[in-house]
Structure formats: structure tokens, C-alpha cells
């Protein structure tokens, strides 16, 4: 139950961090549009996204192992 609650919190925050990365990317990538605040936003959003992605993977690790690393039965 606690894992589900954490996922309900982590997943939307992960989405918001991704959105902040995408929105701030043009300001960082194109020198004419470069703004110091957007560069800081992009860097902070990247760090937050990385941490939340790791937490997301940890919370879903049992699903990952069951889906990709499960042993198949001899008839399948």
C-alpha cells in the first residue's frame, strides 16, 4: 500500500520534471535564446528528474524483474 502511495506521488512529479526539461531545453540549446534562469531551471529539473527516475525504478523493480527476467516454463 505504501509503495502505491509513493508511486502516486513520484509519477506526477516525474512528469512535471520532464516537462520542465523539455520547456527549458530550447533556451539552453540555442545561444540566442539563452537565459540564465532557464539554464538554472534546466539543470535543477535534470537533477530532480534523475532522482525521481531512480526512485521510480526502485519502486517498480519487482515488475521489471517479473516482466523481463522471469524464467519461462519448458512448454513456452
Image: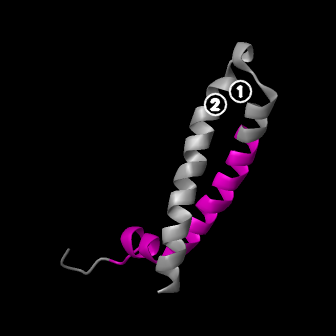
Q: Position of residue 66 (x, y in %)?
A: 39, 76
Q: What's the residue at 48%, 70% (across, down)?
A: 8
The C terminus appears in which quarter of the rendering? bottom left
Is residue 65 part of the magenta span, yes or no? yes
Furthest-top residue in this view:
32
In this view, the residue in front, 18 or 64, is 18
| Residue tagged 2 | 25
Furthest-front residue in this view:
37
In the image, which disc is placed on residue 28? Answer: 1
Q: Position of residue 17 (x, y in %)?
A: 60, 49
Provide the residue span drawn in magenta: 42-71
Q: What's the residue at 61%, 68% (across, down)?
A: 55
Q: Is residue 20 above or below residue 1?
A: above
Dots 2 and 1: beta carbons under 8 Å?
A: yes
Furthest-left residue in this view:
75
Q: Is residue 57 above or below residue 37?
A: below
Number of marks in picture: 2
In this view, the residue in front, 57 or 33, is 33
Q: What's the residue at 64%, 53% (across, down)?
A: 49
> Distance between the Cα atoms at labels 2 and 1?
5 Å
Is residue 61 part of the magenta span, yes or no? yes
In the image, which disc is placed on residue 61? Answer: none
Could you tell me which secondary element the residue under label 1 belongs to?
helix
Q: Position of residue 57 (x, y in %)?
A: 55, 66
Q: Is residue 73 left or right of residue 64?
A: left
Amino acid at each position: 500500500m505504501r509503495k502505491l502511495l509513493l508511486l502516486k506521488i513520484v509519477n506526477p512529479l516525474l512528469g512535471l520534471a520532464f516537462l520542465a526539461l523539455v520547456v527549458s531545453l530550447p533556451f539552453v540549446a540555442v545561444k540566442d535564446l539563452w537565459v540564465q534562469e532557464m539554464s538554472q531551471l534546466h539543470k535543477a529539473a535534470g537533477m530532480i528528474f534523475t532522482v525521481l527516475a531512480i526512485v521510480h525504478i526502485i519502486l517498480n523493480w519487482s515488475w521489471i524483474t517479473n516482466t523481463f527476467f522471469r524464467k519461462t516454463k519448458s512448454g513456452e
